[in-house]
Amino acid sequence: MSGPATAAFSFGPFGAIAVAALALREARQMGREYQDVQHEVQRRAADLADAQRAVRTARCEQLQATRQGVATLETQLERLRRLATALGLPQERVLSLLAPVTAQPAAEGSSDAWQRRLQALQSAATALQQAIDAAHTERPAATPGLDLGLGLAVGELAPLEEALHAYMVQRALLTQLDARQAEPLKQLVARLLARLELAPGEPIPAELDGLAQTIALAPSLERAEALALELRLRIQQHAEQRAAHAAEAAEARALLEALGEDLSDSLRQGLQAVLLGERLLPQTRALAEQALQAQATQRRQQEEAAAAEVLAQSLRDLGYEVDGVQDTFFVEGGVAHIQRHGWGEYFVRLRANVAEQTLNFNVVRAQGAPETPERRRQDTLAEDRWCREFPKLLETLAARGLQLDVQRLLGAGELPVQTVDPASLPTLHTEQRSPARASLRELKP
């Protein structure tokens, strides 16, 4: 090691140095060993991070489950409406049963709005299903054994099975259609819809559902085959749109995770809307980037202040007296001095260069003492002592999240000890002696 040394400084993983600063603070307040407190603080920080992550994950999953429930009920309600028309329910009656949905339009924004939409759909679907059951029972030409239930209980049928059941129910009610073609048309629709990429429980998109039903209700197989060409194209387009949305949803999810709690309600709702099926708007992405920049700035400031605290307290823990290490030491740069009991007029000067992110260490003493061979010998002993202590400081700081990568080393005595204006030196040392009274004994390690 050397007397003069230059080391690049950097901080470990985000949060590590902040945890170290907090642990040092608590250890000092409680009179405990740093290592013991550090484990407790790390555990608390990890538990808090896990809890916050779990809340965010649960929030996103709940939103997606609600959105899927809304989509499922919207599809079922449209099927019920078409079934009610096929049964001849008066239009005024159908509209009155759909009033809860009309009063609660398509959900946007908050999770509460989506919950209200879900409840409105559930209420309307239940009422319309009951009206359909009653109308079918009273219908003179009711089809015995025909199950008009469309799987309103969540999970009762898989989406594809439920769709095929609904199509066949409606076809059975249309007596003018050839019943012998029902099964071939059902198989055709099943093959087409099997190409859809759907998550477990995800409903068939409404636009595809309507076209698939049209095929199932086609008057002939030839007409159905012609319509099948359009459905194949729509399914391909749906796959492309799904892939594009999956990429945007992954981006939105990553932004929500990266920002954590550091985002506004409007930005959170904008990103959550993407998880609910909306596009990621350019203005939402721009707001997220601004929030990330603000977060990075805030975190950097927190880490810089924590690093200064870690540096100062680590030096004190190693037995040094410290002067000049402020919260802004790694922000604005500056000069600090450390000294240990028995060093006399010798100090180690720390100079922070923020632009280059380096710390420079030099043994210094006050100007004014005669430059004699004895003085030079004292200088060499002072540097040699610091050389032996420097590695311990590096090790301690690294363990606490402040990495120092030594870039320049000079051996003790390679350069003269720097002499400085006495006014620039603090009065940290316990033994207040003049340079003339300092002895070699004081400098021996």
Image (cartoon, helix red, strand yellow):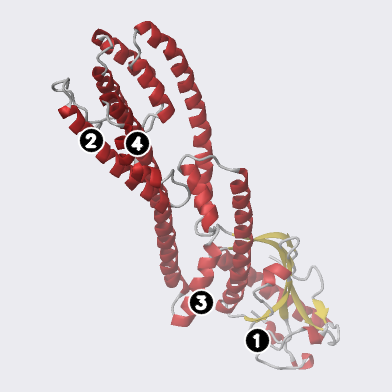
Kind of residue sitting beneath label 2 = Ala
Kind of residue sitting beneath label 3 = Arg
Closer to us: 336 or 406: 336
Q: Which residue is mark 2?
A: 131
Left or right? Give the position of 102 relative to 125.
Answer: right
Mark 2 or mark 1, earlier in chain: 2
Few, some or many residues within 10 Å of mark 3 (<14, 14–19, 20+): some
Q: Residue 276: which quarter of the image?
A: top left
Closer to us: 311 or 238: 238
Give the label, 2 or 3, closer to the camera.
2
The location of residue 390, given as percent across then percent down, is: 64, 69
Q: Secondary structure at mark 1?
A: loop
Q: Which residue is mark 3?
A: 25
Q: Which residue is mark 1?
A: 342
Q: CA distance from mark 4 to mark 1?
A: 80 Å
Is residue 201 visible in this depiction of the protein?
A: no
Few, some or many residues within 10 Å of mark 1 (<14, 14–19, 20+): some
Q: Residue 51: which quarter of the image?
A: bottom left
Left or right? Give the position of 302 relative to 412.
Answer: left
Q: CA distance from mark 4 to mark 2?
A: 20 Å
Give the label, 4 or 1, closer to the camera.
4
Kind of residue sitting beneath label 4 = Thr
